[in-house]
Amino acid sequence: MPKYNILVADDELSQRDALAGFLTKKGFSVITAQSGKEAVAVLKNKSVDLILTDLRMPEMDGMELLTAAKDINPNIEVIVMTAYGSIEGATGAMKQGAADFITKPVDIEQLEMTVNKVLEHKQLIAENKRLKELVNDRFRFGGIISSGKSMAEALSIASRVAESKASVLITGESGTGKELVARAIHFASTRESKPFIAVNMAALPENLVESELFGHEKGAFTGADKFRKGRFESAHEGTIFIDEVGDVPLSTQVKLLRVLQEHTIERIGSSESIAVDVRIIAATNKKLEEMVKTGMFREDLFYRLNVVKIELPPLRQRKTDIPLLINHFITHYSEINNKSIKGLSNDSMDKLMKYPFPGNVRELENIIEQAVVLSRDEIIGVNDLPASVAQSNDMDYNIKQGTFQQRVEAFEKKLISEALKNNNDIQTKAAESLGMTERHLRYKLKKYGLK
């Protein structure tokens, strides 16, 4: 349990000091007040989790303190203390929002039990609230569908950075949803009513990159037959999303750095500096740190872009999201294509859960759209899936990916699986065909989680 702040309000000095001393020994941070008015003053200036108050005090009694405390912070818990003959007043306090009451003279064991019970309940409520908020964030932030921990962490960073002015670098494989996260950050920020301008550097010829980003004057170069406003000017007061920022030519990186440092641009063919107020979100599937080491990406620009980094996991690492995404895409594409698809067959779901999705969420979306369009039944079967999925083997994919050790292990798993299949799952024969002992085979089966 976290360390809580408890306010003890009692006009009797000996009682107040005794309670404060006992609670302090139990690990609580304790503040004391000799009257209700003094307690209210404390509440206005300090963080308090629980009030332990005498019901009868001069000037402001425990009931009035309870009301004032709830007005200041409805989350503050209150335990009232009352003489045995005044229990009716204590029950009235509970109707007004007190968490519990104890009778005087106070039994310290009962006090400890009551305080712990109230604070544990408070903690449970707080955890449930955080859980609900986290679930809402997982499913609602920018329309991004996810329930996995790794994606939740990425979305948590995105939601916290949204209202700031900091530059953001989003990394991840193609198809993981980098632009979707960038849009979510923009629309969760104070710039939501201003432009969101996306530019994909990989799709631009190198000789047109500066013109696209910064614009040009008429006659600035051959073919510039009219004035053109660049993406930065178009994004003024809004957000510019530079996708595949690792493809920005070195010659343009200098000018991009200037925009980040001075918040001004110059159109090609002009020496006039134009002020721009733009929030920059960049994305890449490349290892910019390695590009910095080889001189392919400016170190100063990297640090300017990488103020806050958000790493998006590939879909194969967030498999709990696959059924959620499938249901979403089936609903979406069924409506668009006037189909009444209710779901997937068990075999189809099994295939998709085992598929490595090199194209990530984008590939899954394309697969489901195709299956919805081609399916003749209400349930999508294996035959409705692309051949690349229906005939896929995730071990074949893993052999071609990852570190040397990961690829070796994937190859071992494939050999063992094939040996078991070819020998009707008889381990003795499978081990013999692989040239290993049965004991060694059992070790490998346990290591790789194979059956």
Image (cartoon, rainbow, N blue to C red):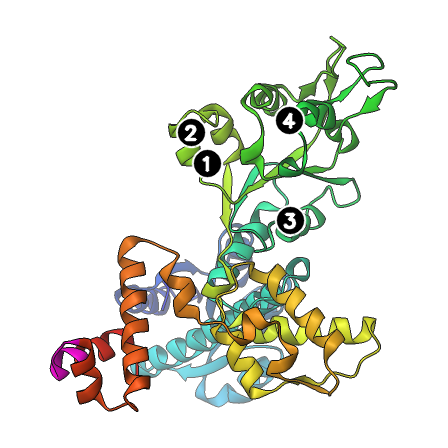
Q: Is residue 339 magenta?
A: no
The magenta span reads 435-441
Q: Please name the residue that numbered disc 3 is placed on.
A: 179
Within 10 Å of the Cα at label 1, are there few (<14), some (14-19), or many (20+) other Cα atoms?
A: some
* Count of number-bearing discs: 4
Circle on res. 206: 4
- Residue 292 numbered tag: 2
Q: Is residue 438 magenta?
A: yes
Q: Of callouts 1 and 3, which one flags the residue occurring earlier in the amino acid sequence?
A: 3
Q: Is residue 396 left or right of residue 227?
A: left
- Taking the view exactly as shown, the residue that stands out farthest to the top is 271
Residue in the foreground of this view, choosing between 322 and 305? 322
Mark drawn on residue 288: 1
Residue 107 falls left or right of residue 187: left
Q: In this view, does 260 lie above or below 360?
A: above
Task: Compute the Cα span from label 2 to label 1.
Answer: 6 Å
Q: In which quarter of the image is residue 352?
A: bottom right
Q: Where is residue 442 in the image (x, y as percent from the top left)?
A: 18, 82
Q: Sequence-wise, which precedes: disc 4 or disc 1?
A: 4
The mark closer to the camera, 4 or 3, is 4
Task: Tell me: 422 left or right of 354.
Answer: left
Residue 21 is situated, as x and y percent measured from the top left of the image, at 29, 65
Do the numbered discs 1 and 3 sit on residues whose CB atoms are within 8 Å? no
Graded by Cα atoms within 10 Å as few (under 14), some (14 to 19) or many (20 or more), the crowding at tag 2 reads some
Residue drawn 60% across the image and 25% down it: 260
Query: What whole-number distance in Å separates the C-alpha atoms at marks 1 and 3?
Result: 18 Å
Mark 3 residue type: Glu
C-alpha distance separating marks 2 and 3: 23 Å
* Three-letter amino acid code of the residue under disc 2: Val
In which image quadrant can residue 58 be found? bottom right
The reply to whether the C-beta atoms of the residues labelled 2 and 1 are less than 8 Å apart is yes
